[in-house]
Image (cartoon, rainbow, N blue to C red):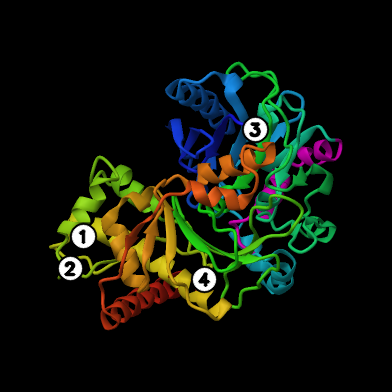
Amino acid sequence: MSGYLLAIDQGTTSTRAVIYDPTGHVCGSASRELTQHYPQPGWVEHDANEIWSSVCDVVPHALAQANIDTKQIAAIGVTNQRETVVVWDRENLSPLAKAIVWQDRRTTDFCRQRARDQDWLQRRTGLVLDPYFSATKLRWLLDANPEWRGRAERGEIACGTIDSFLIAKLTNGTRHVTDVTNASRTLLFDLTKLQWDDELCRYFDVPRRWLPEVLPSAAAFGETRGLGFLPDGIPIGGVAGDQQAALFGQCAFTPGEAKCTYGTGAFLLMHTGSTPVMSRNRLLTTVAAMTDSTPQYALEGSVFIAGAAIQWLRDGLNLFASNAESETLAAKANPDEQLIFVPGFVGLGAPYWIPEARGVLFGLTRGTSRAELARAALEGVAFQVADLIDAATQDLGSALKGLRVDGGMARNDWFLQCQADVLGLPVFAAPNSESTALGAAFLAGLHVGVWPNAESLRKLLTDARPFAPKCDSAERERRLRRWRRAVRAVIGFYVE
Protein backbone atom coordinates (compact mmCIF):
# COMPACT_ATOMS: atom_id res chain seq x y z
CA MET A 1 0.00 0.00 0.00
CA SER A 2 1.19 3.54 -0.70
CA GLY A 3 0.16 6.81 0.82
CA TYR A 4 1.12 9.46 3.30
CA LEU A 5 1.15 9.11 7.09
CA LEU A 6 -0.18 11.76 9.45
CA ALA A 7 1.50 11.78 12.85
CA ILE A 8 -0.16 13.69 15.69
CA ASP A 9 2.44 14.33 18.40
CA GLN A 10 0.72 15.74 21.47
CA GLY A 11 3.48 16.75 23.88
CA THR A 12 3.71 18.54 27.19
CA THR A 13 4.47 22.01 25.87
CA SER A 14 3.15 21.78 22.31
CA THR A 15 1.13 19.81 19.79
CA ARG A 16 2.68 18.95 16.45
CA ALA A 17 1.33 17.41 13.24
CA VAL A 18 3.77 15.92 10.73
CA ILE A 19 3.11 14.46 7.27
CA TYR A 20 5.49 11.71 6.10
CA ASP A 21 5.78 10.08 2.70
CA PRO A 22 6.58 6.35 2.30
CA THR A 23 10.33 7.09 2.36
CA GLY A 24 10.01 8.63 5.84
CA HIS A 25 10.58 12.12 4.45
CA VAL A 26 8.79 15.04 6.14
CA CYS A 27 6.47 16.71 3.64
CA GLY A 28 4.78 19.16 5.99
CA SER A 29 4.54 20.01 9.66
CA ALA A 30 2.98 22.50 12.03
CA SER A 31 3.08 23.02 15.78
CA ARG A 32 1.37 25.06 18.47
CA GLU A 33 2.47 25.71 22.03
CA LEU A 34 0.18 24.88 24.94
CA THR A 35 -0.64 26.90 28.03
CA GLN A 36 0.80 25.48 31.25
CA HIS A 37 -1.41 25.89 34.32
CA TYR A 38 0.10 25.95 37.83
CA PRO A 39 -2.86 26.38 40.22
CA GLN A 40 -0.75 25.56 43.30
CA PRO A 41 2.96 24.90 43.94
CA GLY A 42 3.78 21.47 42.57
CA TRP A 43 0.53 21.22 40.59
CA VAL A 44 0.63 21.17 36.77
CA GLU A 45 -2.48 21.07 34.59
CA HIS A 46 -3.52 21.34 30.94
CA ASP A 47 -6.81 22.39 29.42
CA ALA A 48 -7.92 19.33 27.43
CA ASN A 49 -10.13 21.54 25.27
CA GLU A 50 -7.04 23.54 24.32
CA ILE A 51 -5.22 20.30 23.52
CA TRP A 52 -7.98 19.24 21.14
CA SER A 53 -8.17 22.73 19.65
CA SER A 54 -4.43 22.58 18.97
CA VAL A 55 -4.88 19.30 17.07
CA CYS A 56 -7.65 20.85 14.99
CA ASP A 57 -5.31 23.75 14.24
CA VAL A 58 -2.03 22.02 13.37
CA VAL A 59 -3.35 19.18 11.19
CA PRO A 60 -4.77 21.43 8.44
CA HIS A 61 -1.62 23.57 8.48
CA ALA A 62 0.61 20.50 8.09
CA LEU A 63 -1.57 19.23 5.24
CA ALA A 64 -1.43 22.61 3.51
CA GLN A 65 2.35 22.70 3.77
CA ALA A 66 2.58 19.17 2.39
CA ASN A 67 0.23 20.19 -0.44
CA ILE A 68 -1.61 16.86 -0.46
CA ASP A 69 -5.25 15.88 -0.51
CA THR A 70 -6.65 14.33 2.66
CA LYS A 71 -7.65 11.27 0.59
CA GLN A 72 -3.94 10.51 0.20
CA ILE A 73 -3.51 9.85 3.93
CA ALA A 74 -3.11 6.10 4.43
CA ALA A 75 -3.26 6.18 8.23
CA ILE A 76 -2.86 8.28 11.35
CA GLY A 77 -0.36 7.66 14.12
CA VAL A 78 -0.83 9.22 17.55
CA THR A 79 1.87 9.77 20.15
CA ASN A 80 1.38 11.60 23.39
CA GLN A 81 2.72 12.87 26.68
CA ARG A 82 2.42 9.88 28.98
CA GLU A 83 0.85 9.56 32.46
CA THR A 84 -1.19 12.76 32.01
CA VAL A 85 -4.86 11.93 32.64
CA VAL A 86 -8.15 13.45 31.58
CA VAL A 87 -11.80 12.64 32.34
CA TRP A 88 -14.54 13.35 29.83
CA ASP A 89 -18.28 12.91 29.29
CA ARG A 90 -18.92 9.98 26.96
CA GLU A 91 -21.96 11.60 25.35
CA ASN A 92 -20.61 15.02 24.41
CA LEU A 93 -16.86 14.28 24.74
CA SER A 94 -16.37 17.36 26.94
CA PRO A 95 -13.59 17.22 29.57
CA LEU A 96 -14.95 17.41 33.12
CA ALA A 97 -11.84 19.05 34.58
CA LYS A 98 -8.38 20.11 33.55
CA ALA A 99 -5.99 17.28 32.74
CA ILE A 100 -3.48 16.47 35.49
CA VAL A 101 -0.03 16.48 33.88
CA TRP A 102 2.65 13.86 34.46
CA GLN A 103 4.82 16.45 36.23
CA ASP A 104 2.14 17.09 38.87
CA ARG A 105 3.14 16.38 42.50
CA ARG A 106 -0.20 16.68 44.32
CA THR A 107 -0.29 13.01 45.32
CA THR A 108 3.10 13.01 47.05
CA ASP A 109 1.62 12.40 50.52
CA PHE A 110 -0.40 9.42 49.26
CA CYS A 111 2.75 7.86 47.85
CA ARG A 112 4.86 8.52 50.94
CA GLN A 113 2.20 7.03 53.24
CA ARG A 114 2.22 3.80 51.23
CA ALA A 115 5.95 3.47 50.67
CA ARG A 116 5.89 0.03 52.33
CA ASP A 117 3.99 -1.30 49.30
CA GLN A 118 6.70 -0.28 46.86
CA ASP A 119 8.23 -3.73 46.32
CA TRP A 120 5.10 -5.61 45.27
CA LEU A 121 3.90 -2.71 43.14
CA GLN A 122 7.21 -2.67 41.29
CA ARG A 123 7.14 -6.43 40.76
CA ARG A 124 3.63 -6.20 39.32
CA THR A 125 3.98 -3.03 37.24
CA GLY A 126 7.70 -2.36 36.75
CA LEU A 127 7.15 1.13 38.17
CA VAL A 128 7.81 2.90 41.44
CA LEU A 129 5.09 4.41 43.62
CA ASP A 130 5.37 8.05 42.64
CA PRO A 131 3.00 10.91 41.77
CA TYR A 132 4.41 10.72 38.23
CA PHE A 133 2.13 7.84 37.27
CA SER A 134 -1.54 7.93 36.36
CA ALA A 135 -3.25 5.84 39.05
CA THR A 136 -2.70 8.26 41.92
CA LYS A 137 -3.98 11.12 39.75
CA LEU A 138 -7.16 9.21 38.89
CA ARG A 139 -7.71 8.37 42.55
CA TRP A 140 -7.26 12.03 43.46
CA LEU A 141 -9.82 13.10 40.84
CA LEU A 142 -12.36 10.59 42.13
CA ASP A 143 -11.81 11.68 45.74
CA ALA A 144 -12.15 15.34 44.74
CA ASN A 145 -15.31 14.64 42.74
CA PRO A 146 -17.25 11.91 44.62
CA GLU A 147 -20.16 11.98 42.17
CA TRP A 148 -17.86 10.81 39.39
CA ARG A 149 -17.48 7.33 40.84
CA GLY A 150 -21.12 6.45 40.27
CA ARG A 151 -21.03 7.96 36.80
CA ALA A 152 -17.89 5.97 36.01
CA GLU A 153 -19.53 2.73 37.18
CA ARG A 154 -22.58 3.49 34.99
CA GLY A 155 -20.37 4.14 31.98
CA GLU A 156 -21.40 7.78 31.66
CA ILE A 157 -17.88 9.19 31.84
CA ALA A 158 -14.56 7.98 30.50
CA CYS A 159 -10.98 8.42 31.60
CA GLY A 160 -7.64 7.86 30.00
CA THR A 161 -4.28 9.19 29.02
CA ILE A 162 -4.13 11.84 26.30
CA ASP A 163 -4.06 9.27 23.48
CA SER A 164 -7.41 7.86 24.63
CA PHE A 165 -8.96 11.31 24.74
CA LEU A 166 -7.68 12.21 21.26
CA ILE A 167 -8.87 8.93 19.76
CA ALA A 168 -12.31 9.48 21.31
CA LYS A 169 -12.43 12.92 19.68
CA LEU A 170 -11.06 11.70 16.33
CA THR A 171 -13.62 8.87 16.17
CA ASN A 172 -16.54 10.96 17.49
CA GLY A 173 -16.75 8.90 20.66
CA THR A 174 -16.99 5.50 19.02
CA ARG A 175 -13.73 4.20 20.53
CA HIS A 176 -12.36 4.18 24.08
CA VAL A 177 -8.92 2.61 23.64
CA THR A 178 -5.25 2.95 24.50
CA ASP A 179 -2.09 1.04 23.64
CA VAL A 180 0.14 -1.15 25.78
CA THR A 181 2.86 1.48 26.21
CA ASN A 182 0.52 4.07 27.67
CA ALA A 183 -1.27 1.47 29.79
CA SER A 184 2.07 0.36 31.22
CA ARG A 185 2.58 3.87 32.69
CA THR A 186 -0.50 3.89 34.91
CA LEU A 187 0.38 1.62 37.89
CA LEU A 188 -2.82 -0.28 37.00
CA PHE A 189 -1.35 -2.62 34.36
CA ASP A 190 0.20 -6.04 34.92
CA LEU A 191 3.59 -5.96 33.24
CA THR A 192 3.73 -9.66 32.31
CA LYS A 193 0.05 -10.41 31.67
CA LEU A 194 -0.27 -7.18 29.65
CA GLN A 195 -3.73 -6.40 30.99
CA TRP A 196 -5.45 -4.25 33.58
CA ASP A 197 -5.06 -5.76 37.04
CA ASP A 198 -8.04 -6.08 39.38
CA GLU A 199 -5.91 -5.99 42.54
CA LEU A 200 -4.17 -2.82 41.43
CA CYS A 201 -7.50 -1.21 40.57
CA ARG A 202 -8.77 -2.03 44.06
CA TYR A 203 -5.56 -0.75 45.65
CA PHE A 204 -5.88 2.64 43.95
CA ASP A 205 -9.70 2.57 44.15
CA VAL A 206 -10.11 3.09 40.40
CA PRO A 207 -13.05 1.23 38.75
CA ARG A 208 -11.69 -1.20 36.18
CA ARG A 209 -14.64 -0.69 33.82
CA TRP A 210 -13.68 2.99 33.69
CA LEU A 211 -10.45 2.12 31.86
CA PRO A 212 -9.99 1.91 28.07
CA GLU A 213 -9.47 -1.23 26.01
CA VAL A 214 -5.75 -2.00 25.55
CA LEU A 215 -4.32 -2.83 22.10
CA PRO A 216 -0.83 -3.39 20.66
CA SER A 217 0.86 -0.20 19.44
CA ALA A 218 0.16 -1.05 15.79
CA ALA A 219 -3.52 -1.99 15.63
CA ALA A 220 -7.00 -0.89 14.54
CA PHE A 221 -7.68 1.95 16.99
CA GLY A 222 -10.62 3.31 15.01
CA GLU A 223 -11.41 5.56 12.06
CA THR A 224 -11.97 9.29 11.77
CA ARG A 225 -15.56 10.35 12.01
CA GLY A 226 -17.43 13.65 12.11
CA LEU A 227 -14.39 15.92 11.79
CA GLY A 228 -14.32 19.19 9.89
CA PHE A 229 -10.63 18.96 8.99
CA LEU A 230 -10.36 15.28 7.98
CA PRO A 231 -12.74 13.03 6.04
CA ASP A 232 -14.44 10.03 7.61
CA GLY A 233 -12.79 6.64 7.39
CA ILE A 234 -9.04 7.35 7.82
CA PRO A 235 -7.68 4.53 10.02
CA ILE A 236 -5.81 5.29 13.23
CA GLY A 237 -3.23 2.52 12.97
CA GLY A 238 -0.47 3.41 15.43
CA VAL A 239 -0.42 4.69 19.01
CA ALA A 240 2.44 4.86 21.50
CA GLY A 241 3.52 6.99 24.42
CA ASP A 242 6.03 9.58 23.31
CA GLN A 243 9.16 7.88 24.63
CA GLN A 244 8.33 4.44 23.28
CA ALA A 245 7.41 6.09 19.98
CA ALA A 246 10.83 7.78 19.90
CA LEU A 247 12.56 4.44 20.62
CA PHE A 248 10.66 2.96 17.68
CA GLY A 249 11.38 5.99 15.52
CA GLN A 250 15.10 5.48 16.18
CA CYS A 251 14.65 1.86 14.98
CA ALA A 252 15.86 0.55 18.35
CA PHE A 253 13.98 -2.74 18.12
CA THR A 254 16.50 -5.18 19.59
CA PRO A 255 17.98 -5.75 23.08
CA GLY A 256 20.75 -3.33 24.05
CA GLU A 257 19.74 -0.55 21.67
CA ALA A 258 19.11 2.69 23.56
CA LYS A 259 18.03 6.26 22.97
CA CYS A 260 17.52 9.43 24.97
CA THR A 261 14.90 11.97 23.98
CA TYR A 262 15.29 15.54 25.23
CA GLY A 263 11.96 17.28 25.39
CA THR A 264 10.31 18.90 28.39
CA GLY A 265 12.05 16.12 30.31
CA ALA A 266 14.78 13.70 29.24
CA PHE A 267 13.97 10.02 28.87
CA LEU A 268 16.41 7.17 28.43
CA LEU A 269 14.98 3.92 27.06
CA MET A 270 17.01 0.76 26.50
CA HIS A 271 15.33 -2.13 24.70
CA THR A 272 15.56 -5.42 26.60
CA GLY A 273 13.63 -7.78 24.30
CA SER A 274 10.62 -9.98 25.04
CA THR A 275 11.41 -10.49 28.73
CA PRO A 276 11.15 -7.70 31.31
CA VAL A 277 14.33 -6.80 33.21
CA MET A 278 13.61 -5.59 36.74
CA SER A 279 15.92 -2.80 37.83
CA ARG A 280 18.01 -2.99 40.98
CA ASN A 281 18.85 0.70 40.64
CA ARG A 282 15.42 2.31 40.66
CA LEU A 283 14.95 2.54 36.93
CA LEU A 284 11.58 1.62 35.46
CA THR A 285 10.63 -1.48 33.55
CA THR A 286 8.17 -0.53 30.86
CA VAL A 287 6.48 -1.94 27.77
CA ALA A 288 8.14 -1.01 24.46
CA ALA A 289 6.05 -0.49 21.33
CA MET A 290 4.46 -3.76 20.18
CA THR A 291 3.56 -4.37 16.54
CA ASP A 292 1.65 -7.56 17.42
CA SER A 293 0.93 -9.66 20.51
CA THR A 294 4.62 -10.44 21.13
CA PRO A 295 5.71 -8.68 24.35
CA GLN A 296 8.45 -6.05 24.07
CA TYR A 297 10.12 -4.36 27.04
CA ALA A 298 12.57 -1.62 27.91
CA LEU A 299 14.39 -0.19 30.89
CA GLU A 300 13.67 3.50 31.37
CA GLY A 301 15.12 6.38 33.28
CA SER A 302 13.08 9.56 33.57
CA VAL A 303 14.45 13.07 34.09
CA PHE A 304 11.50 15.35 34.77
CA ILE A 305 13.14 18.64 33.75
CA ALA A 306 15.33 19.00 30.66
CA GLY A 307 14.17 21.41 27.96
CA ALA A 308 11.83 22.87 30.58
CA ALA A 309 14.90 24.26 32.39
CA ILE A 310 15.89 26.20 29.26
CA GLN A 311 12.29 27.30 28.82
CA TRP A 312 12.34 28.62 32.41
CA LEU A 313 15.48 30.65 31.75
CA ARG A 314 13.83 32.00 28.60
CA ASP A 315 10.31 32.72 29.86
CA GLY A 316 10.64 32.80 33.64
CA LEU A 317 13.84 34.85 33.90
CA ASN A 318 13.76 36.41 30.41
CA LEU A 319 17.48 35.73 29.95
CA PHE A 320 17.17 35.20 26.20
CA ALA A 321 14.54 35.26 23.48
CA SER A 322 14.95 31.79 21.96
CA ASN A 323 16.12 28.39 23.16
CA ALA A 324 18.82 28.41 20.49
CA GLU A 325 20.57 31.28 22.29
CA SER A 326 21.38 28.97 25.19
CA GLU A 327 23.98 27.26 22.99
CA THR A 328 25.78 30.52 22.18
CA LEU A 329 25.68 31.66 25.81
CA ALA A 330 26.96 28.35 27.21
CA ALA A 331 29.95 28.49 24.87
CA LYS A 332 30.82 31.94 26.25
CA ALA A 333 30.54 30.99 29.93
CA ASN A 334 33.51 31.64 32.21
CA PRO A 335 35.07 28.24 33.06
CA ASP A 336 36.18 29.61 36.44
CA GLU A 337 32.53 30.09 37.47
CA GLN A 338 31.77 26.60 38.80
CA LEU A 339 27.98 26.79 38.86
CA ILE A 340 25.89 23.67 39.41
CA PHE A 341 22.15 23.66 38.69
CA VAL A 342 20.02 20.77 40.00
CA PRO A 343 16.77 21.39 38.07
CA GLY A 344 14.37 19.66 40.44
CA PHE A 345 11.45 22.02 39.81
CA VAL A 346 8.93 19.17 40.07
CA GLY A 347 11.04 16.73 42.08
CA LEU A 348 13.83 14.37 41.08
CA GLY A 349 13.05 11.35 38.92
CA ALA A 350 15.17 8.25 38.37
CA PRO A 351 17.26 6.99 39.99
CA TYR A 352 16.45 9.14 43.04
CA TRP A 353 12.64 9.49 43.08
CA ILE A 354 12.38 12.44 45.46
CA PRO A 355 9.08 14.18 44.66
CA GLU A 356 9.62 16.80 47.39
CA ALA A 357 12.83 18.14 45.83
CA ARG A 358 12.93 21.50 44.08
CA GLY A 359 15.45 23.30 41.88
CA VAL A 360 18.68 24.50 43.47
CA LEU A 361 21.67 26.52 42.22
CA PHE A 362 25.10 26.04 43.79
CA GLY A 363 28.06 28.36 43.37
CA LEU A 364 26.48 31.73 42.61
CA THR A 365 28.93 34.64 42.72
CA ARG A 366 28.86 38.31 41.78
CA GLY A 367 30.45 37.22 38.52
CA THR A 368 27.63 34.85 37.58
CA SER A 369 25.94 35.95 34.37
CA ARG A 370 23.27 34.55 32.11
CA ALA A 371 25.99 32.68 30.21
CA GLU A 372 26.92 30.65 33.30
CA LEU A 373 23.25 30.02 34.07
CA ALA A 374 22.69 28.69 30.54
CA ARG A 375 25.73 26.44 30.79
CA ALA A 376 24.70 25.14 34.23
CA ALA A 377 21.17 24.34 33.01
CA LEU A 378 22.49 22.36 30.04
CA GLU A 379 25.07 20.58 32.19
CA GLY A 380 22.39 19.75 34.77
CA VAL A 381 20.49 17.81 32.11
CA ALA A 382 23.62 16.04 30.89
CA PHE A 383 24.60 15.01 34.43
CA GLN A 384 21.13 13.60 35.12
CA VAL A 385 21.32 11.47 31.97
CA ALA A 386 24.77 10.25 33.05
CA ASP A 387 23.19 9.03 36.29
CA LEU A 388 20.59 7.10 34.27
CA ILE A 389 23.21 5.50 32.03
CA ASP A 390 25.23 4.45 35.07
CA ALA A 391 22.15 2.81 36.64
CA ALA A 392 21.19 1.03 33.38
CA THR A 393 24.73 -0.26 32.92
CA GLN A 394 24.69 -1.73 36.41
CA ASP A 395 21.30 -3.37 35.80
CA LEU A 396 22.33 -4.96 32.51
CA GLY A 397 25.92 -5.76 33.51
CA SER A 398 27.27 -4.38 30.26
CA ALA A 399 28.30 -0.95 29.03
CA LEU A 400 26.67 0.97 26.23
CA LYS A 401 28.71 1.50 23.10
CA GLY A 402 26.96 4.77 22.31
CA LEU A 403 23.76 6.71 22.83
CA ARG A 404 21.23 7.74 20.16
CA VAL A 405 19.59 11.07 20.92
CA ASP A 406 16.71 13.12 19.57
CA GLY A 407 14.33 15.88 20.64
CA GLY A 408 14.62 19.64 20.77
CA MET A 409 17.87 19.79 22.74
CA ALA A 410 19.50 17.43 20.23
CA ARG A 411 19.76 20.47 17.93
CA ASN A 412 22.20 22.06 20.41
CA ASP A 413 25.73 20.99 19.45
CA TRP A 414 27.30 22.44 22.60
CA PHE A 415 24.95 20.38 24.74
CA LEU A 416 25.55 17.16 22.79
CA GLN A 417 29.32 17.59 23.16
CA CYS A 418 28.80 18.14 26.88
CA GLN A 419 26.66 14.98 27.03
CA ALA A 420 29.34 12.93 25.29
CA ASP A 421 31.99 14.32 27.67
CA VAL A 422 30.14 13.47 30.89
CA LEU A 423 29.20 10.01 29.58
CA GLY A 424 32.60 9.15 28.15
CA LEU A 425 30.62 7.68 25.23
CA PRO A 426 29.90 8.75 21.67
CA VAL A 427 26.54 10.41 21.19
CA PHE A 428 24.70 10.05 17.88
CA ALA A 429 22.20 12.76 16.97
CA ALA A 430 19.29 11.52 14.87
CA PRO A 431 19.05 13.26 11.48
CA ASN A 432 15.39 13.82 12.24
CA SER A 433 15.17 15.27 15.76
CA GLU A 434 11.43 14.50 15.85
CA SER A 435 11.81 10.74 16.31
CA THR A 436 8.65 10.70 18.42
CA ALA A 437 6.38 11.67 15.53
CA LEU A 438 8.33 9.42 13.16
CA GLY A 439 7.79 6.44 15.47
CA ALA A 440 4.02 7.03 15.49
CA ALA A 441 4.05 7.22 11.68
CA PHE A 442 6.12 4.02 11.46
CA LEU A 443 3.62 2.15 13.67
CA ALA A 444 0.62 3.38 11.68
CA GLY A 445 2.31 2.60 8.36
CA LEU A 446 3.19 -0.93 9.45
CA HIS A 447 -0.39 -1.59 10.45
CA VAL A 448 -1.85 -0.56 7.08
CA GLY A 449 0.95 -2.05 4.98
CA VAL A 450 2.90 1.01 3.85
CA TRP A 451 5.98 -0.91 5.06
CA PRO A 452 6.17 -4.72 5.24
CA ASN A 453 7.97 -5.11 8.57
CA ALA A 454 9.95 -3.27 11.20
CA GLU A 455 13.34 -4.18 9.74
CA SER A 456 12.43 -2.44 6.48
CA LEU A 457 12.27 0.83 8.43
CA ARG A 458 16.00 0.81 9.17
CA LYS A 459 16.68 1.50 5.50
CA LEU A 460 14.80 4.78 5.78
CA LEU A 461 17.11 6.26 8.42
CA THR A 462 20.13 8.25 7.26
CA ASP A 463 23.40 8.49 9.16
CA ALA A 464 23.36 10.18 12.56
CA ARG A 465 25.78 12.97 13.52
CA PRO A 466 28.42 11.67 15.97
CA PHE A 467 29.84 13.54 18.96
CA ALA A 468 32.93 11.87 20.43
CA PRO A 469 33.95 12.57 24.04
CA LYS A 470 36.81 15.05 24.41
CA CYS A 471 37.03 15.09 28.21
CA ASP A 472 39.55 12.79 29.91
CA SER A 473 38.35 10.28 32.49
CA ALA A 474 39.84 12.10 35.49
CA GLU A 475 38.10 15.37 34.63
CA ARG A 476 34.84 13.53 33.91
CA GLU A 477 34.93 11.79 37.30
CA ARG A 478 35.69 15.09 39.06
CA ARG A 479 32.70 16.76 37.46
CA LEU A 480 30.39 13.86 38.25
CA ARG A 481 31.52 13.78 41.90
CA ARG A 482 30.69 17.49 42.29
CA TRP A 483 27.31 16.95 40.63
CA ARG A 484 26.40 14.00 42.86
CA ARG A 485 27.49 15.88 45.96
CA ALA A 486 25.10 18.66 44.95
CA VAL A 487 22.25 16.17 44.41
CA ARG A 488 22.86 14.65 47.86
CA ALA A 489 22.70 18.13 49.37
CA VAL A 490 19.36 18.82 47.67
CA ILE A 491 17.93 15.50 48.88
CA GLY A 492 19.22 16.16 52.41
CA PHE A 493 17.57 19.58 52.46
CA TYR A 494 14.14 18.47 51.24
CA VAL A 495 13.85 15.04 52.88
CA GLU A 496 14.26 15.05 56.64
| Cβ–Cβ under 8 Å for marks 4 and 2 | no
Say whether marks 3 and 1 touch (CB < 8 Å). Answer: no
Residue tagged 2:
337
Q: Position of residue 78 (x, y in %)?
A: 60, 38
Residue 85 visible in the picture: no
Q: Nearer the viewer, mark 4 or mark 3?
A: 3
Which of labels 3 and 2 is toward the front?
3
- Report the span colored magenta: 129-154
Q: CA distance from mark 3 to mark 1?
A: 53 Å
Crowding at dot 4, Cα within 10 Å, few <14 / some 14-19 / many 20+, comes out as many
Secondary structure mostly seen in magenta is: helix
> Label 1, on which residue?
372
Give the CA distance from mark 1 to mark 2.
Answer: 7 Å
Residue 143 seen anywhere in this rendered image of the structure: yes
Q: Are marks 1 and 2 in contact (CB under 8 Å)?
A: yes
Q: Amino acid at mark 2?
A: Glu
| Residue position for label 3 | 1
Check the image and report above or below for 43 versus 127: above
Q: Pinpoint residue 207: horizontal percent, then vertical percent.
A: 81, 48
Q: Position of residue 121 (x, y in %)?
A: 72, 67
> On screen, 494 above or below 405?
below
Quarter holding residue 322: top left
Nearest to N terminus: mark 3 or mark 1: 3
Identified by mark 1, the residue type is: Glu
Q: Quadrant of residue 189?
A: bottom right
User: Which one is in front in this view, the residue at disc 3 or the one at disc 1?
Assistant: 3
* Residue corresponding to mark 4: 351
